[in-house]
Amino acid sequence: MISCLRGVLYEIGADSVIIDVHGAGLEISLHQRALAALPRVGQSLLLHTHLQVLENEFRLYGFLDKEEVKLFKTLLGISGMGAKGAMNVLAAMEPLSFYQAIASGDEKVLTGIPGIGKKSAGRLIFELKNKVAEMSLTPADDTGGSAVEEVLQAMESLGYGRSEVYSLVMELKQGGELSERLEDNIKTLLKHKVRQMK
């Protein structure tokens, strides 16, 4: 409904901001990482947003980029996870780091998020692990995104599940070990898989 807002930062609160959009002051709830990245009051600001419609109120949530909005909406679909819990996740880590924790089944990382206990971490991994590979994990202008998808598809054709190799592929991408040649990437990935098995 309201996918983004651009205006002048008018006021910064403990967990929200007020943006002046053509004379209208709109309050937007933000997570702590977003609050820390804000410009000074009086400067222009663009936030990606999600409007939550409840029985007795409308609430706008603001995010640094579209990937955060996507993760927020995904988390809202998890049983027992409300907007507050979803914002805690985004305050604690960037979407890519969260997806990597899910893909590798890292409960220790997830339980480090405020409000996420061992039971909740297990539920997140169970409900999201198979969805992680379907999510867009790189910006549209990131040329590495297609390389990641190509490698994942190739490994699937070799009999590997996406959730089985996803975290390793992303580690290689972040480490700059993925090249433009698919053949080289497959060889690199298989070498790492062999090392993991030893």
Image (cartoon, rainbow, N blue to C red):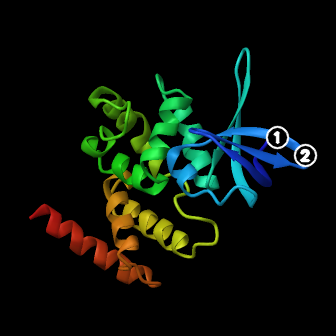
Q: Residue furthest left?
A: 198
**Residue corresponding to mark 1:** 25
Relative to residue 62, is residue 65 depicted above or below?
Answer: below
Asked if 150 appears above or below 62 in the picture, the reply is: below
Q: Please tell me which residue is depicted at 58% across the width and 53% down the height of the picture.
A: 67
Expressed as whole percent of the image width and height from the top left, the position of residue 95 reads 48, 52
Q: Secondary structure at mark 2?
A: loop
Location of the C terminus by quadrant is bottom left
Q: Position of residue 170 (x, y in %)?
A: 39, 65
Please tell me which residue lies in front, 24 or 74.
24
> For the N terminus, which image quadrant?
top right
Q: Residues within 10 Å of mark 1 (few under 14, many from 20)?
A: some
80 is higher (above) or lower (below) than 159: above
Q: Name the residue rendered at 38%, 30% in the picture.
A: 115
Question: Residue drawn at (53%, 69%), measured in percent from left and top?
Answer: 145
Give, as a three-letter code, the residue at label 1: Gly
The answer to whether 101 appears left or right of 88 in the picture is left
Residue 68 to residue 168: above or below: above
Do we see residue 77 in this rendering? no
Disc 2 residue type?
Gly
In front of the other: 16 or 65: 16
Q: CA distance from mark 2 to mark 1?
A: 6 Å
Q: Which mark is residue 23?
A: 2
Residue displayed at 33% across by 34% down: 121
In the visual, does 90 lie left or right of 49? left
- Asked which secondary structure carries label 1, the reply is strand
Q: Answer few, some or many: residues within 10 Å of disc 2's Cα (few below 14, many 20 plus, some between 14 and 19).
A: few
